[in-house]
Amino acid sequence: MAITDQEIAELKEVARKNRIDTIDVTGWAGGAHIGGALSMMDILTILYWKYLKIDPSNPDWPERDRFVLSKGHGGVGHAVVLANKGYYDPAILRDFNKTGSAFGMHLDGNKVAGVDVSTGSMGHGLPMSVGLALGARCKGEDWLTYVMLGDGECDEGSCWEAAMAAAHYKTGNLIGFVDRNHMMIDGPTESVMSLEPFADKWRAFGWETREIDGHDYTQLATAIEFAQGYTDGPVMIVANTVKGKGVSYMENDPAWHYGGLSAELIRQAKSDLGEG
Ligand SMILES: Cc1ncc(C[n+]2csc(CCOP(=O)(O)OP(=O)(O)O)c2C)c(N)n1
């Protein structure tokens, strides 16, 4: 098996803490894109705590793997992950998105340690990731590029232009995820702009594609290890997730794409996540 039961238990505990901290930062900031930060948290946790080749004490290590949060509005969750990995003191997130803070709602690669690429305007992260993957190949370097897309983000045509380029150039060093939470900013993807048959679209664009439960650590480990070993072209992992995962009143409710949290909502969220 790609992952042991003990590792899974440990990763689930890390993800639980990451989710609780994301609730806190959202509370301090007065609001954030909380639903999509929670849906992708298991994927970010297994990547950062098990698979990414990184060194938080040396964020610019040239041989590190790159991670691009193409759905850059999930920055509140990414900022927590980077803090809890040791890139910076978690206490500085008390000023998240405040005037003068290095942390905007969308993370700036020039200001935040561990952020390889500034994102936030959707539809740009995958194109930049294809460039990173081609750059590594040109330089003969063996680090990998991982990229996380939103499913609503895939309404952007530039995602599909990049998908074609990645397949054309057979970027076997590029591993994509779509956080397939079936929700976008104001409703279900299938009502706003239907994506299905979504995994087959990636296959048609030439990507080796796996469709998994994005909250299941065994499935995540199996898919990621397959992707790491697959060098013939790009791999897309369509990860089915729940928007607002872990918080009862947020799950699958598009109203929680972005929101602020009262003391009572924070208390309820933490209780749902097993704290307090
Ligand atoms: C080019 C661009 N247009 C619009 C927005 C505003 N916006 C931010 S998040 C979002 C919806 C994204 O949906 P999805 O990718 O499914 O995100 P998730 O549900 O994972 O949070 C929109 C339209 C943006 N950031 N960039």
Image (cartoon, grey):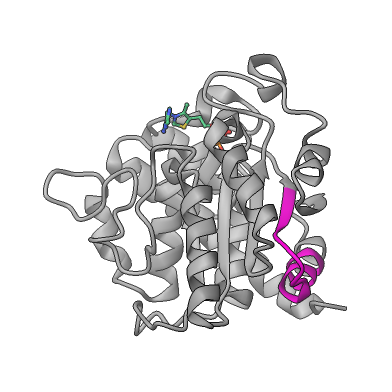
Q: Residue at x 57, y 27 (%)?
A: 184
Q: Residue at x 80, y 70 (%)?
A: 226
211 above or below 17? above
Specify the quadrant of the image occupied by residue 190.
top right
Position of the N terminus, as image quadrant, is bottom right
230 above or below 58? above
> Along the horizontal axis of the image, is 120 left or right of 133?
left
Specify the farthest residue to the right.
1
Q: In this orientation, which residue lies closer to the viewer: 99 or 266?
A: 99
In magenta stretch: residue 35 = no
x and y percent of residue 23 in the render?
Answer: 44, 46
Q: Residue at x 80, y 79 (%)?
A: 4
Q: Is residue 14 visible?
A: no
The number of discs equals 0
201 above or below 48? above
Q: In this orientation, which residue lies closer to the viewer: 203 or 43?
A: 203
x and y percent of residue 212 in the render?
Answer: 81, 51
x and y percent of residue 89 in the render?
Answer: 29, 71
Residue stretch rendered in magenta on the structure: 222-238
